Image (cartoon, grey):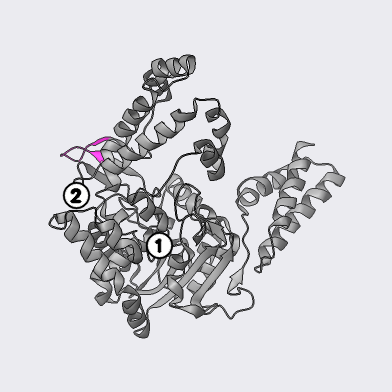
């Protein structure tokens, strides 16, 4: 089997970024942000007590906005789209096989490709880290250099891409300048922004609303939902003030001038968003050039496909965007518009839809990971394969894979015969679930989680 090396192009927040001085010395981590909780509380303590005591903002939201400004300033962008500071992504100019244990953990936590690595080898998997708030043209050039490096290390003539989320915008910028080199064969887009994101366009156009911030936090899930009950105890206008002022700071420092984020404006929304820019500026010239290319990208992709490049799209549908934006009713995976992630149906035979698949947990759906592996090896070429139908369900087996099944296997060692049989039955059920690639619903996953948790607690 002749396989190409694989390059993962991640999304926003999936690269570690370092702030450096002019001599290349590290000052601090720019992402993930460094935040001392003790210092944070000392900064907020006075205004927080005043707010709680008198039930008014009392400058609390201004304090929070100042902290957001301090945190985002290292990542700030100049008005021409260039960086204010020297930001270096922590890069991996080596294969997964050559990575340290910590480096592997970082990559595989976001992209759990262990099963794929068994087939194609860790030596053929590479991770492209980049400054996701940088100039997207610079990122495209860096990706071209990375492709050259990978080809040199492996001796391969071509590479394959696995593209996730904002990586879709990076892919477009790369193909704009470097598709003539014909270095890429398969492109597997997973929840990728291939025609921007309504969510981003709404933020650019101020088409978001925070009348019910507690409800918003609750609807977002995760950490945001966990603080919604506490937020409900605060004065009604305070949370809205905090969110509005924090968003304004982020827009000033990053959003308004970042070409990577401008590349996420859908073609149909571009003129309205672009109207906010002075057309004579360097930034306007950059984003207009990106947009002009984007308008013809679908046509170019079809031309590239005729020359042998293969495009695959795996996307979620049936979920809405967050209720905070005007476009909340757009069909999506909760973040990426389905129409964008599916490339507008440009390649119908190589596009798969996963019902109610959450954007942030796309790679925790084991069927998506399995399908990626089959595409890479050529075992699946179109969505006519009955094992991977065009429309499928969604599930998240991360908790089973990372936590519960390993605990069940460990518990086997000291379990009684009766309990050992129950634990083994759960492990067998887990393997059975992974073998089923057509998802009806995720009830079997949730039921198995409950069964294992109950056995471990006994």
Whether 199 is among the magenta residues is: no
The residue at 83%/44% (across/down) is 419
Residue 17 falls in which quadrant of the image?
Answer: top left
Outermost residue toward the bottom?
A: 306
Q: Is residue 354 left or right of residue 39?
A: right
According to the picture, the residue beneath numbered tag 2 turns out to be 82
Query: In the rendered structure, which disc, 2 or 1, sits on the residue that comes first in sequence?
Result: 2
- Does dot 1 land on a helix, a strand or a loop? loop
Residue 210 visible in the picture? yes
Magenta stretch bounds = 19-27
Q: Is residue 429 above or below residue 402?
A: below
Q: In the image, 192: left or right of 179?
A: right
Q: Position of residue 383 (x, y in %)?
A: 56, 77
Quarter holding residue 457: top right
Q: Name the residue under label 1.
A: 193
Label tally? 2
Residue 26 part of the magenta segment: yes
């Amino acid at each position: 089997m002749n396989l190409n090396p694989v390059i993962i192009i991640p999304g926003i927040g999936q690269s570690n970024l370092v702030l450096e001085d002019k001599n290349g010395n590290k000052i601090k981590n720019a992402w993930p942000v460094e935040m001392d909780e003790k210092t944070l509380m000392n900064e907020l303590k006075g205004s927080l007590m005043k707010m709680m005591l008198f039930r008014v903002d009392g400058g609390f939201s201004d304090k929070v906005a100042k902290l957001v400004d301090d945190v985002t300033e290292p990542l700030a962008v100049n008005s021409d789209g260039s960086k204010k500071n020297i930001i270096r992504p922590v890069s991996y100019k080596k294969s997964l096989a050559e990575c340290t244990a910590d480096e592997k953990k970082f990559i595989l936590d976001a992209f759990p490709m262990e099963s794929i690595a068994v087939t194609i080898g860790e030596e053929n998997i590479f991770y492209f880290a980049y400054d996701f708030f940088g100039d997207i043209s610079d990122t495209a050039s860096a990706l071209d250099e990375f492709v050259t490096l990978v080809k040199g290390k492996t001796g391969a003539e071509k590479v394959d891409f696995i593209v996730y989320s904002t990586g879709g915008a990076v892919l477009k910028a790369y193909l704009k300048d470097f598709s003539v080199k014909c270095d890429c064969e398969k492109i597997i887009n997973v929840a990728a922004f291939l025609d921007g994101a309504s969510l981003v366009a709404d933020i650019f156009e101020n088409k978001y609303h925070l009348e019910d911030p507690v409800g918003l936090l609750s609807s977002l899930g995760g950490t945001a939902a966990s603080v919604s009950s506490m937020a409900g105890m605060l004065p009604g206008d305070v949370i809205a003030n905090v969110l509005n002022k924090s968003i304004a700071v982020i827009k000033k420092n990053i959003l308004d001038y970042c070409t990577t984020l401008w590349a996420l404006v859908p073609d149909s929304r571009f003129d309205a968003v672009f109207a906010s820019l002075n057309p004579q500026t360097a930034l306007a010239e950059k984003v207009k050039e990106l947009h002009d290319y984007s308008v013809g990208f679908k046509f170019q992709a079809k031309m590239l496909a005729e020359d042998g490049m293969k495009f695959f799209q795996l996307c979620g549908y049936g979920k809405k965007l967050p209720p905070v934006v005007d476009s909340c009713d757009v069909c999506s995976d909760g973040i990426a518009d389905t129409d964008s992630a599916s490339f507008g149906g440009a390649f119908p035979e190589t596009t798969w839809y996963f019902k109610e698949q959450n954007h942030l947990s796309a790679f925790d759906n084991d069927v998506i990971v399995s399908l990626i592996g089959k595409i890479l090896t050529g075992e699946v070429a179109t969505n006519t394969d009955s094992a991977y139908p065009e429309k499928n369900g969604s599930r998240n087996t991360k908790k089973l894979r990372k936590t519960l099944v390993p605990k069940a296997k460990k518990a086997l060692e000291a379990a009684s015969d009766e309990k050992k049989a129950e634990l083994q039955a759960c492990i067998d059920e887990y393997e059975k679930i992974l073998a089923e690639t057509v998802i009806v619903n995720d009830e079997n996953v949730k039921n198995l989680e409950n069964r294992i948790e109950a056995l471990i607690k006994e």
